[in-house]
Amino acid sequence: MDFLTLAKERYSCRKLTDRPVSEEQIRAILEAGLAAPTACNYQPFKIWVMTSDEALAKVKASCRQQFIQPCPVVFVIGGDTSRAWVRDYDGKNFADVDASIIAAHMMLEIQDQGLATTWIGHFDPKKLGDTFPDMQGYSLIAMFAAGYAADDAVPAEPHTKCRPEEELIQRY
């Protein structure tokens, strides 16, 4: 599948099955994240992979339940502001930018693996950090519940609504 088709077919799937995801698929998703560029190649990020029933239950407790119902794996991505490149002109720290690039690569690889996901932003990072102390000190930017889409999974209605290009693109 070419990249543009992959990007257009991906949607936020909120209805997954509990069918297992293979270790090879998880590895490919992680490799996609590790291959992503970061500012000055500082790599100020960490990826947490949740596959045990105990870890998945704890992750579910930190977010709205409809985002993580049955699912075999959850990825959490965070940026470390103390390790990130900082733009000297205005002090912009790139930890969140870098972590978002990693997350976008992973999200698209999830789709390429024949799986589905949604980028979960509606979670309590403090609760997650309290539950998983090694997450403390990171700016937790994304969580992905990943797995196989349920047979009746469909994109949410807003998925197909797009503002006109002329509102989104400015050429000079």
Image: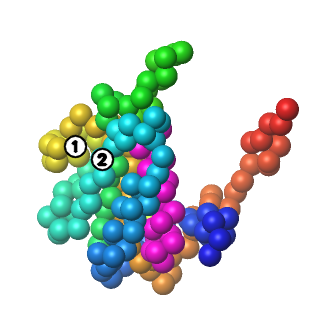
Q: Farthest residue in the front direction?
A: 40
Which residue is nearer to you in this view: 21 or 151?
21
Number of labels in the image equals 2
Vertical order, 17 against 145 (above or below): below
Q: Which label was assigned to residue 14?
A: none
Q: Which label was assigned to residue 135?
A: 1
Quadrant occupied by the C terminus: top right
Label 1 crowd (10 A; few <14 / some 14-19 / many >=20): many
Element type where label 1 sits in the image: helix
Element type where label 2 sits in the image: strand
**Which residue type carries mark 2?**
Lys
**Which residue type carries mark 1?**
Met
Q: Residue at x 55, y 73 (%)?
A: 154
Q: Position of residue 120 (x, y in %)?
A: 41, 53
Q: Quadrant of residue 115?
A: bottom left
Q: Farthest residue in the right direction?
A: 172
Q: Which label was assigned to residue 46?
A: 2
Residues drawn in magenta: 97-116
Contact (Cβ within 8 Å) of mark 1 with mark 2? yes
Quadrant occupied by the N terminus: bottom right
